[in-house]
Amino acid sequence: MAGVRTEAYILLGLRICGAVVMGLIGWSVGDPVMALFPPPFDNYAFAHIITMTLFALVGIVLFPALFGRPLTALYDRIANLSAAQIIAGFMGLGAGLLLAALLAFPLARLPEPFGPVLPFLAAVGFATLGLGIMGLRYREMFAILNIKLPATRPEEGAIYAREPMLLDTSAIIDGRVADVSATGFVRGELIVPRFVLAELQYIADSSDPLRRARGRRGLEVLRRLQRESPVPVRLVNDDPDTSQRVDEKLIALAKQWGCPIITNDYNLNKVASLQGVTVLNINELANAVKTVLIPGESLHIRVIQPGRETGQGVGYLEDGTMVVVEEGQAFLDRTIEVTVTKVLQTSAGRMIFARPVAQMINVK
């Protein structure tokens, strides 16, 4: 509703501006038009009022049609910026204009046609450059200036922070992000760019049955997020033109907004981290919350298959952690008590080595 009211206010303002600007233009052209009116209408007041009214009516229609959509899009873009980003933008604009002003005098002394034109082009160019640099690197700039950015606070009555978090295609297909969000640990708004949704649809329309199933699963997870997530899930049309690849577009968008990316894509994780983008990896989160066991602890495990080495058996904890049971092959399809002997943390996750309690007694 707020967005609808804002758009209505913008259109109203444009109609008023159009009526005033075009009305003044109509008043100024009243003199030559006055001669076209027959007596007794060929007087100064009548001609000027008629032309002013006609031009004002044209302005009421023309200004919203020309400027309504760009101004609404600009307002939506500014509304999504934090106060720090807006301040940084003004700082970049001021720095760019100051540099252009320093160059204006020597540029103006150049021969025509360069002298009259280059100062204006320098002002536009350096202002745009200043805005772009501060928009992308405002956090680093503030850190260099030893300016601490305030923590993003939720709006009154809201349970989430306004800082967005971008969702990657792999995280949506994986599905665990919906479970994490449902617990309330995710406090930021979840953002799904349209190009991520397009990639999901492309995968769902694949001729390969496995890829098609993955894409449809991702669409179902997205519907579940929109339906059940305690924080808003928003689709945005922002599409950086830096690349055609989805991963590079996500990184560019994360840099632009200064927000993290939620993913479980290993390559995206590494590339984004190298470029200074915060990555929230679902796999790392899953490994971090797995049951912590130390050597000497006992647990009950069901041995479901032989291991790689002779005599080994393999079982799994409820969270999917693999347990390798030495001398456990003799207990296939049985639930036994084991004692942890070693815990290994690998890139694929945590692996536990154990020995049946009966074997430990025999060793002693």
Image (cartoon, rainbow, N blue to C red):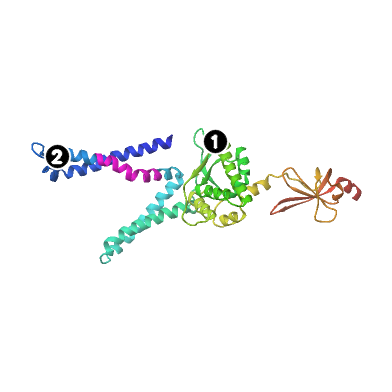
Q: Quadrant of residue 31?
A: top left
- Which secondary structure type mostly characterizes the magenta part of the structure? helix
Give the residues in magenta.
Answer: 57-74
Q: Is residue 256 left or right of residue 111?
A: right
Is the residue marked by circle 2 packed among few (<14), some (14-19), or many (20+) residues within 10 Å?
many
Q: Nearer the viewer, residue 185 or 26?
A: 26
Q: Residue furthest left?
A: 39
**Residue in the picture at 42% in, 43% down:** 76
- Image quarter where the N terminus lies is top left
Q: Quadrant of residue 36?
A: top left
> Does 58 appear in magenta?
yes
Q: Nearer the viewer, residue 330 or 102?
A: 330
> Between marks 2 and 1, how big is the CA–CA gap?
61 Å
Can residue 297 be seen in this snapshot?
A: no
Please name the residue that numbered disc 1 is placed on: 159
Q: Is residue 42 above or below residue 258?
A: above
Q: As shown in the figure, which amino acid type bears the numbered disc 1?
A: Ile
Residue 47: give its label: 2
Q: Nearer the viewer, mark 2 or mark 1?
A: 2
Q: As shown in the figure, which amino acid type bears the numbered disc 2?
A: Ala
Residue 6 on image: x %, y %:
39, 37
Residue 153 on image: x %, y %:
51, 39
Can residue 228 be seen in this snapshot?
A: yes
Residue 91: give its label: none
Residue 201 on image: x %, y %:
55, 48
In terms of secondary structure, where does tag 2 sit? helix
Q: Nearer the viewer, residue 36 or 15?
A: 36
